[in-house]
Image: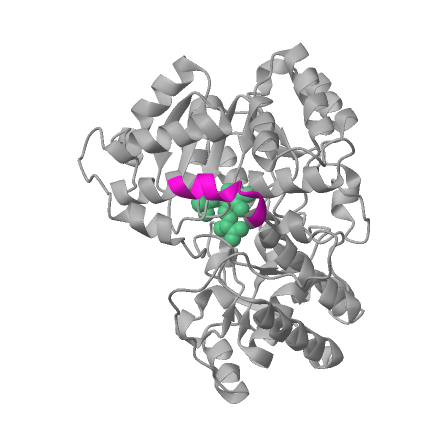
Amino acid sequence: MAQDNANRKRSWAEPYKIKMVEQVRMTTVEEREKLIRDTGFNTFLLRSRDVYIDLLTDSGTSAMSDRQWAGMMLGDEAYAGSENFYNLEEAVQNYYGYKYLVPTHQGRAAEHIISQLMIKEGDIIPGNMYFTTTKLHQELAGGTFVDVIIDEAHDSDNEHPFKGNIDLDKLKQVIDQYGRDRIPYISIATTVNMAGGQPISLDNLKQVRELTRKHDIPIIHDMTRVAENAYMIKKHEPGQEKRDVRDIVKEICNLTDGATMSAKKDALVNIGGFLAVNDQELFDKARNMVVIYEGLHTYGGMAGRDMEALAIGIRESVDEDHIRARVGQVEYLGKKILGAGIPIVKPVGTHGVFLNARRILPHLSQDELPAQALAAAIYVDSGVRAMERGIVSAGRDPQTGDQIYPKLELVRLTIPRRVYTQAHMDVVAESIEEVWLNRENIRGLKFVYEPEYLRFFQSRFDLI
Ligand code: F0G
């Protein structure tokens, strides 16, 4: 459809019609100043009713389609052997190619199971940059995550089109240093969230596969945003432009041995996830373990109707018009903000625009939590809710308790799928510009409460 318009002048537009709306509430600057103070300057602690445009996360915030909602009515809520489980299993096999499916209530539950099953005390898990929950589950199982992403990923100005790539020399070095027996698997994410939603190339993944095959090391794939990654491969990797996103998704999965999925992102549902593997012995163990933590192996914490919506969402996620518009909307916002001269992570990633808080607030040291302060300032300006992805998210070294200082100190404006229009994106860009113009007045923050795990969710702060 959109291909017909390729050579004619046509504005970009969302490839759907809106059939139902949800009212949002406007608040005043004075109200928001009080609200952010009352919630300890942590956007996670705001109530949704006090948010105008919610760019906290793309997780579980998608608008489901009419077909998905129709699927909800077909929920087979049997405790065992729900029909919807078999539909989901078929979708996972069809679109991703993994043999065995273990449903879970969301991504981190699948991470928990795979980490407990594959990692032993003292193990090393190399990967293309950490994700908060993934790394924590690896640590809780006795492992240590080692970042082997290319250096370009840590430099927000570097325009490498595949900043999710693995540095093969770094990976070889880790394998030489620790030996195969201490490396249960390589952890590969498509796309890399903490790097700014950056993709890994097919070529790089093939090289990683070749190397790991030589050493007999499995690859476990965090496939949370695999369709978005596949779209970037189609758009930017030489020789891939004519392929369907669907084929590229399948090829990515075929290059790996198993996957954890937070279906709340790419797969367009509000809750759900799974673990998928090709090894039968591992599957048997996972299917047994899911019973302890999630529920029977044919529902794993999801209602039948949720599994049906997910099976349909998987199909919709690889639709060419959908994925082009989804990533295109993120790019639209990114280009607007860049056009105002505001430093962001380049190139624009697939699920959000990441503001470079260190460059925006050079008067704050990293200990003064610039990204946390910037996210709070954006909320006060316009009611747009963003998320800190910097020193607060990085947390502490589990052994020493010392603060970790990440190179990237970012604020993420994450775009939910199929929820907001281009006009919303314009408002967001205007607000970011306003905050940028008044940036010198933004003050640093200090912790007043810090929980032990994943502290960014629940910490509270105060002005320095
Ligand atoms: N892996 C990646 C790459 C993620 O982005 C997330 C969640 C998870 C795993 C965990 O999945 O939330 O379903 O348990 N990311 C959300 C975010 C929270 O806002 O980026 P989950």
Is residue 243 shown above or below 228?
Answer: above
Left or right of 233 on screen, residue 319: left
Q: Which of 204 and 83 is in front in this view?
A: 83
User: How many numbered circles are shown?
Assistant: 0
Q: Residue 235, can we see it? A: yes
Nearer the observer, 99 or 4: 4
Chief SS of the magenta region: helix
Residue at 52 percent of width and 89 percent of height:
30
Q: Quick check: is 317 in the magenta stretch?
A: yes
**Does 149 sit left or right of 318 as displayed?**
right
Q: Where is residue 208 in the image (x, y as percent from the top left)?
A: 69, 23
Across and down, in percent, residue 352 comes to: 62, 56
Q: x, y percentage for residue 111?
A: 46, 35
456 or 78: nearer the viewer: 78
Mark yes or no: residue 399 visible. no
Stretch of the chain drawn in magenta:
312-321
Q: Check the image and tell me how it is coloured.
A: one colour
**Residue 3 in magenta?**
no
Q: Residue furthest left?
A: 78
**Position of the C terminus by quadrant:** bottom right
Q: In this view, does 169 lie above or below 424?
A: above
Q: Which of 254 and 72 is in front in this view?
A: 72
| Residue 168, placed above or below residue 367 | above
Asked where in the image residue 312 lies, by quadrant, the reply is: top left
Left or right for 17, reference 180? left
Q: Residue placed at 73% from the left, 69% from the top?
A: 364
Q: Residue at x 49, y 59 (%)?
A: 450
Q: Could you tell me residue 235's position as x and y percent?
A: 72, 42
The structure residue drawn at horizontal position 18% and vertical position 34%, both measured from the top left corner, is 79
